[in-house]
C-alpha cells in the first residue's frame, strides 16, 4: 500500500472484480486504503485470488457472489457488504459483458442478457448503494461526500458500434442513468460519474489484440498508439472516488488513448 492513502477507512464494492478492468480497479482502491468487496458471478477462484493479492499487499478485502441483474441477489450482497464493513462509501458498477452478432441475427435472449447485466445491473446496485448513502449521510472523517458511484461505461456510449448494437445501447443507457442520478442526487452530496474506457487489454476483447495483425488494426483506432491496461482505469477510479475529485459529478471521463477523437480524420476529410 502507498503512504498517501486517498481512500483510507472507506469501503468499496466493485462488481465483476474477478478479472479485467474490475480487478484492476479493486487492486487500485485497496492500494489507496479502501476495504474492498470483490463481486463476481462465476469463477470464485479468480475472485479469491484478487482478495489474496490485496491482503498480501496489506489491504482488506472480501469476495461477494451475486448476479448483478438479480434484484434479490444484489440486495443480499449489500446486506453482507454492510455487515462486513459497516457501510459502503464507494460503488464501482463495473460488471458487464458482450454478446456480439450482426443486427439481423441478434437473438432477443442476447439483447436482453446484455441490457440486463450492463444496464439494469448498474441500476440495481446503484439503488442499493444510494439507499445506504442516504441512510448514513456524510462522515466527514472519511469523505466530503455522502457516497460516490462510478459507472464503468465505454467509448461506445458515444461511438456507435455495428455488430455490437446491444452493447452500445446498454452503454448509451448507462450514460443517461449516470447523468440523471447525478443531477437528482447532487443535493444529497452523492457524486455519480462514469469512466469511458477505450480498448483495454482484458479477456472481453482478446480477439482485438491477441495476434500482431489484430493489434496493428486496433492501433489505427488509437492515436496514442498503445492498448490500455486495467491499472490505467484503476488509477483513475481511485482518484475519481477520492476527495481530490469532490467537485466532479455527472461526467464521463474517457480514458481511451484518443479513441473518441475520430482518428480516421487525422489524415482525411
Ligand atoms: C469493449 C471492447 C472494445 C473497446 C473499444 C469496450 O467497451 O468492451 O471490446 O475493445 O470498447 O472498442
Image (cartoon, rainbow, N blue to C red):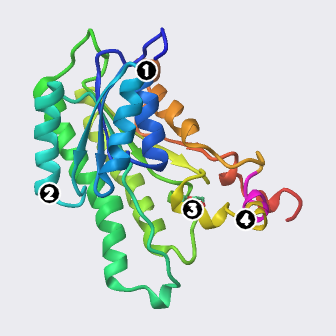
Per the image, label 4 sits on a secondary structure element best described as loop
Q: Which mark is residue 105?
A: none
Mark 3–mark 1 distance (CA, rounded to whole Å): 28 Å
- Tell me if label 4 and label 1 are in contact, CB under 8 Å: no
Mark 4–mark 3 distance (CA, rounded to whole Å): 12 Å
Report the mark closest to the observer, 4 or 1: 4
Mark 4–mark 2 distance (CA, rounded to whole Å): 40 Å
- Tell me if label 3 and label 1 are in contact, CB under 8 Å: no
Among the two numbered marks 4 and 1 on one chain, the one whose residue lies closer to the N terminus: 1
Mark 2–mark 3 distance (CA, rounded to whole Å): 28 Å
* Residue marked by disc 4: 211
Report the mark closest to the observer, 1 or 2: 1
* Quarter holding residue 267: bottom right
Segment tinted magenta in the rendering: 216-222
* Residue marked by disc 2: 71
Per the image, label 1 sits on a secondary structure element best described as loop
Quadrant of the frame with the C terminus: bottom right
Residue density around tag 3, few if under 14, some if 14–19, many if 20 or more, within 10 Å: few
- Tell me if label 1 and label 2 are in contact, CB under 8 Å: no
* Residue marked by disc 3: 205
* Quarter holding residue 246: top left
* Residue marked by disc 1: 32
Query: Is residue 160 part of the magenta span, yes or no?
Result: no
Left or right of 263, for residue 253: left
Mark 4–mark 1 distance (CA, rounded to whole Å): 35 Å
Amino acid at each position: 500500500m502507498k503512504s498517501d492513502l486517498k481512500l483510507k477507512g472507506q469501503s468499496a464494492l466493485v462488481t465483476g472484480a474477478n478479472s479485467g478492468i474490475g480487478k484492476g480497479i479493486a487492486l487500485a482502491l485497496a492500494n489507496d486504503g479502501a476495504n474492498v468487496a470483490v463481486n463476481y458471478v462465476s469463477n470464485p477462484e479468480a475472485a479469491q485470488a484478487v482478495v489474496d493479492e490485496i491482503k498480501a499487499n496489506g489491504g482488506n478485502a472480501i469476495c461477494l457472489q451475486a448476479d448483478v441483474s438479480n434484484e434479490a441477489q444484489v440486495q443480499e450482497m449489500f446486506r453482507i457488504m454492510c455487515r462486513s464493513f459497516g457501510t459502503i462509501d464507494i460503488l464501482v458498477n463495473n460488471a458487464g459483458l458482450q454478446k456480439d452478432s450482426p443486427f439481423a441475427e441478434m437473438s432477443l435472449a442476447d439483447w436482453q442478457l446484455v441490457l440486463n447485466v450492463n444496464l439494469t445491473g448498474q441500476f440495481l446496485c446503484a439503488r442499493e448503494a444510494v439507499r445506504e448513502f442516504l441512510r448514513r449521510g456524510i462522515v466527514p472523517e472519511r469523505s466530503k461526500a455522502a457516497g460516490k458511484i462510478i459507472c464503468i461505461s465505454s467509448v461506445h456510449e458515444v461511438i456507435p458500434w455495428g455488430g455490437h448494437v446491444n452493447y452500445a445501447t446498454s452503454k448509451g443507457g448507462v450514460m443517461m442513468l449516470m447523468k440523471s442520478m447525478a443531477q437528482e442526487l447532487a443535493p444529497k452530496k452523492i457524486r455519480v460519474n462514469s469512466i469511458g474506457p477505450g480498448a483495454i487489454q482484458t479477456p472481453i476483447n482478446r480477439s482485438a489484440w491477441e495476434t500482431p495483425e489484430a493489434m496493428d488494426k486496433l492501433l489505427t483506432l488509437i492515436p496514442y498508439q498503445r492498448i490500455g491496461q486495467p491499472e490505467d482505469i484503476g488509477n483513475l477510479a481511485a482518484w475519481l472516488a477520492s476527495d481530490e475529485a469532490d467537485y466532479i459529478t455527472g461526467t464521463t471521463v474517457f480514458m481511451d488513448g484518443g479513441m473518441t477523437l475520430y482518428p480516421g480524420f487525422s489524415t482525411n476529410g
